[in-house]
Image (spheres, grey):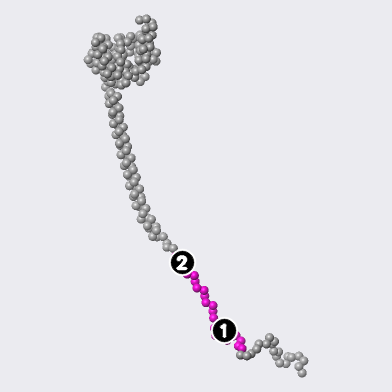
């Protein structure tokens, strides 16, 4: 293969590697062209492209894509399933094809930045598909949301019950406190003033009496015998 063609082929492989969600590497020794064509169609239904590759070109492409660890799987005739989408569905297709074509051997794979051994790649086929897993997760989430909503309603109901009980407990205490409160004193009328004491007959007897027609002289009459110059 001319050098320019090799470079172009390596570039194409690198693009397919970087554009895939996972890689499944197989050994196809003993498969006919018809078998490979049927396998390619089967994997295409699972969202994977199947291609026979030269190990030397695949090693260079993997190194350029910074996953040189794939070199350990590039031994013997190699065909790669470039998975776009669900790796589990693609692994199931490969395992089913291996049952139909015993010459097909799953050597390993690459997914999420890690190289998978043959057993790990086969274990993917035993998992639930992405659709089933998403459906299961959705069911779990729906159940959790329903459970959370029920717990919230229950907690709210308990809170309202406690609030009502507390209000009922406070009501008698308010009535008792209002009944025991001292009544305000009734305003009393102002006391009547004490009467002015009237003079009694004894008090009147002590006062000098005056006969009618008597005149009070401002000059006091001198006693007899005391007048000077009296002859």
Q: Is residue 150 above or below residue 194?
A: above
Q: Relative to residue 119, is residue 185 drawn left or right?
A: right
Residue occupying the point 55% across, 82% down = 199
Q: Is residue 129 magenta?
A: no
Main SS category, magenta section: loop
Q: Is residue 79 above or below residue 173?
A: above
Q: Is residue 197 above or below residue 14?
A: below
Question: From where the camera sits, is residue 176 visible?
Answer: yes
Q: Secondary structure beneath disc 2?
A: loop
Residue occupying the point 54% across, 81% down = 198
What x and y, as percent, mark residue 195?
Answer: 52, 77
Q: Relative to residue 213, is residue 229 drawn left or right?
A: right
Q: Quadrant of the C terminus?
A: bottom right
Q: What residue does disc 1 label?
A: 203
Count of residue discs? 2
Point out the tag, 2 or 1, that comes first from the N-terminus. 2
Question: From where the camera sits, is residue 122 visible?
Answer: no
Count neighbours of disc 1 (C-alpha within 10 A) and say few if under 14, some if 14 to 19, many if 20 or more: few
Magenta stretch bounds: 185-211
Residue occupying the point 33% across, 43% down = 156
Tell me the number on the disc at residue 36: none
Count neighbours of disc 2 (C-alpha within 10 A) and say few if under 14, some if 14 to 19, many if 20 or more: few
Q: What residue does disc 2 label?
A: 187
What x and y, as percent, mark residue 206?
Answer: 59, 85
Q: Secondary structure beneath disc 1?
A: helix
């Amino acid at each position: 293969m001319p050098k320019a063609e090799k470079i172009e082929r390596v570039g194409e492989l690198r693009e397919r590697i970087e554009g895939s969600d996972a890689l499944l590497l197989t050994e196809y020794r003993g498969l006919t062209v018809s078998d490979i064509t049927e396998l390619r169609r089967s994997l295409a239904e699972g969202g994977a492209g199947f291609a026979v590759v030269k190990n030397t070109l695949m090693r260079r492409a993997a190194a350029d894509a910074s996953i040189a660890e794939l070199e350990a799987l590039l031994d013997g005739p190699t065909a790669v399933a470039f998975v776009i989408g669900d790796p589990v569905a693609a692994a199931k297709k490969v395992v089913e094809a291996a049952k139909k074509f015993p010459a097909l051997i799953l050597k390993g794979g690459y997914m999420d930045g890690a190289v998978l051994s043959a057993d790990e790649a086969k274990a993917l086929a035993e998992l639930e598909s992405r659709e089933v897993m998403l459906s299961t997760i959705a069911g779990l989430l729906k159940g959790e949301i329903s459970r959370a909503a029920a717990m919230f309603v229950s907690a709210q109901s308990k809170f309202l019950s406690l609030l009502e009980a507390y209000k009922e407990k406070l009501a008698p205490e308010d009535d008792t406190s209002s009944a025991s409160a001292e009544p305000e004193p009734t305003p009393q009328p102002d006391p009547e003033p004490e009467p002015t004491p009237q003079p009694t007959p004894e008090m009147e007897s002590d006062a000098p009496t005056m006969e009618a027609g008597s005149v009070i002289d401002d000059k006091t009459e001198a006693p007899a015998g005391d007048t000077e110059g009296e002859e």
